[in-house]
């Protein structure tokens, strides 16, 4: 289940209208991957990224 954090501060427009979604899933050959995406309602800022969990906690 993805975790969604609402009302986060947007790095672009500074409004607290950013929704941050975090998720972790098992990917064949890559292991556990950490996914996150940011969406701002005000300025439509969007960013999504994927990283290997092993890299983050190394
Ligand atoms: Zn924004």
Image (cartoon, rainbow, N blue to C red):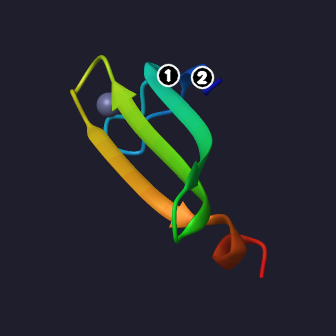
In the image shown, does 9 or 45 lie closer to the viewer?
45
Mark 2 vs mark 1: in front: 2
Percent coordinates x, y for residue 51 in the rendering: 52, 65
Badge number at residue 16: 1
In the image shown, does 44 or 15 lie closer to the viewer?
44
The alpha-carbon separation of the residues under discs 2 and 1 comes to: 14 Å
Q: Which quarter of the picture shows residue 50? A: bottom left
Percent coordinates x, y for residue 39 in the rendering: 35, 29
Residue extending farthest to the right is: 57
Residue placed at 70% from the left, 74% from the top? 54
In the image shown, does 32 or 48 lie closer to the viewer?
32
58 versus 27 height, above or below: below
Residue extending farthest to the bottom is: 58
How packed mark 1 is, by other alpha carbons closer than 10 Å (few <14, some 14-19, many 20 or more), is some
Residue placed at 42% from the left, 45% from the top? 11
Element marked by disc 1: loop
Labels 2 and 1: the sequence-earlier one: 2
Residue extending farthest to the front is: 28
Element marked by disc 2: strand
């Amino acid at each position: 289940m993805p975790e969604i954090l609402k009302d986060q501060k947007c790095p672009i427009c500074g409004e607290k209208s950013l929704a941050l979604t975090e998720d972790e899933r098992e990917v064949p050959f890559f292991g556990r991957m950490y996914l996150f995406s940011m969406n701002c309602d005000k300025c439509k800022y969007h960013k999504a990224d994927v990283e290997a969990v092993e890299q983050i906690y190394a």
